[in-house]
Image: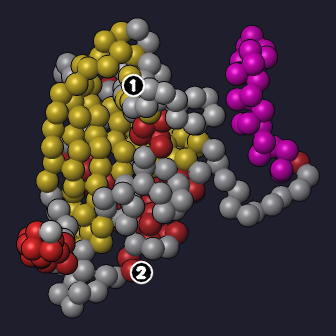
């Protein structure tokens, strides 16, 4: 038994050495697969593309590799009238995961209305996905999900490039320019959707994309907007609650006919 344990330990040494080495960050690679989903009772064929796309500095050196998942409905010949929705979650340290697998993606977790998993565990078609009317890309900001900053020759990361309200907005605008160009979606209607802190992110992105990238959006969607500790009294506070009142009234079929 002792001999077996010794030999087993020796066999583990190469594996330990492997995991002790630095893991190379994927820079520019994707995987493409074909799928079908039922949305509102209609079968939708679509292409799923997931992978990494780089971000460069002014010297054209890669400084980050951002992970994304891009869903595109098949059979659309003219994308000029096909909306592209660019989706973010919040945090700001959250990957774009819950908008992906709980709300707008073509496949979602099996969860109840309160967000708790239900048996049998797994995933299912999302009958309420927006993929029937719009293509969607879910973007993971740097150091969320699989996205990573790339150290320079000295092994250091320029943290000021990524970690800050304005820094976050600026580099994501640059990356989105590359994505939209590569996917040939400049003529498509473009929308941003953000959840929680993502509402702050997309609010800033809308202006940054316009000012620095000449990318004009068709709309911005705010999901669960956060006050971020900013409190206001009186009429301003009441007016800020109007979207919540409208959503609750819609859910309970209490909206007037004209709305």
Which badge, 2 or 1, is on the more N-terminal residue?
1
- Residue 247 in magenta stretch: yes
- Quadrant for residue 224, please give it: top right
Taking 119 as reference, is 6 left or right? left
Q: Is residue 136 visible in the rendered structure shown here?
A: yes
- 116 horizontally vs 69: left or right: right
The part of the chain drawn in magenta is 236-259
Instruction: State the separation of the CA atoms marked 2 and 1.
Output: 40 Å
**Horizontal and vertical percent position of residue 128:** 47, 22
- Of the 4 image quadrants, the one containing the N terminus is bottom left
* Label 2 sits on residue: 160
Identify which residue is drawn at 47% across, 43% down: 98
Q: Position of residue 58 (x, y in %)?
A: 23, 76
Q: Nearer the viewer, residue 7 or 138?
A: 7
Task: For label 1, count other residues whose C-alpha is less than 10 Å away and answer few (under 14), some (14-19) or many (20+).
Answer: some
**Mark 2 or 1, closer to the camera:** 1
Quadrant assignment for the C terminus:
top right
Q: Is residue 221 above or below residue 164?
A: above
Instruction: Identify residue for label 1.
Output: 124
Residue at 70 percent of width and 29 percent of height: 247
Secondary element at image label 1: strand
SS at mark 2 in the image: helix
Residue 20 image position (x, y, % from top left): 19, 78
Is residue 129 visible in the rendered image? The answer is no
Relative to 55, does residue 237 appear above or below in the rendering? above
Q: Say how many tags the image has.
A: 2
Instruction: Give the main secondary structure of the magenta stretch.
Output: helix
Q: Nearer the viewer, residue 256 or 210?
A: 256
Q: Where's residue 192, x and y in %?
A: 46, 44
Q: Is residue 194 left or right of residue 29?
A: right
- Name the residue: 32% across, 19% down: 37
């Amino acid at each position: 038994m002792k001999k077996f344990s010794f030999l087993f330990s020796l066999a583990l040494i190469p594996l330990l050495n492997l995991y002790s080495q630095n893991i190379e960050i994927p820079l520019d690679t994707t995987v493409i697969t074909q799928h079908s989903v039922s949305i509102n009772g209609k079968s939708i064929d679509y292409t799923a593309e997931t992978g990494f796309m780089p971000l460069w500095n002014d010297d054209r050196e890669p400084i980050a590799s951002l992970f994304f998942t891009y869903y595109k409905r098949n059979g659309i010949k003219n994308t000029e009238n096909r909306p592209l929705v660019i989706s973010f979650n919040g945090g700001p340290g959250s990957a774009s995961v819950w908008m992906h697998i709980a709300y707008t993606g073509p496949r979602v977790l099996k969860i109840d209305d309160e967000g708790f998993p239900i048996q049998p565990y797994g995933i299912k078609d999302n009958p309420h996905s927006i993929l029937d009317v719009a293509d969607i890309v879910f973007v993971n900001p740097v150091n969320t999900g699989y996205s990573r900053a790339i150290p320079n020759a000295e092994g250091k990361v320029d943290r000021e490039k990524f970690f800050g309200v304005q820094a976050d907005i600026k580099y994501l605008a640059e990356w989105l320019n590359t994505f939209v160009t590569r996917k040939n979606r400049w003529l498509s209607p473009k929308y941003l959707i953000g959840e929680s802190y993502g509402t702050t992110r997309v609010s800033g992105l809308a202006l940054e994309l316009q000012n620095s990238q000449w990318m004009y959006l068709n709309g911005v969607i705010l999901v669960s907007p956060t006050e971020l500790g900013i409190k206001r009294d009186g009429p301003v506070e009441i007016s800020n609650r109007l979207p919540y009142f409208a959503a609750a009234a819609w859910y309970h079929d209490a909206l007037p006919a004209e709305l």
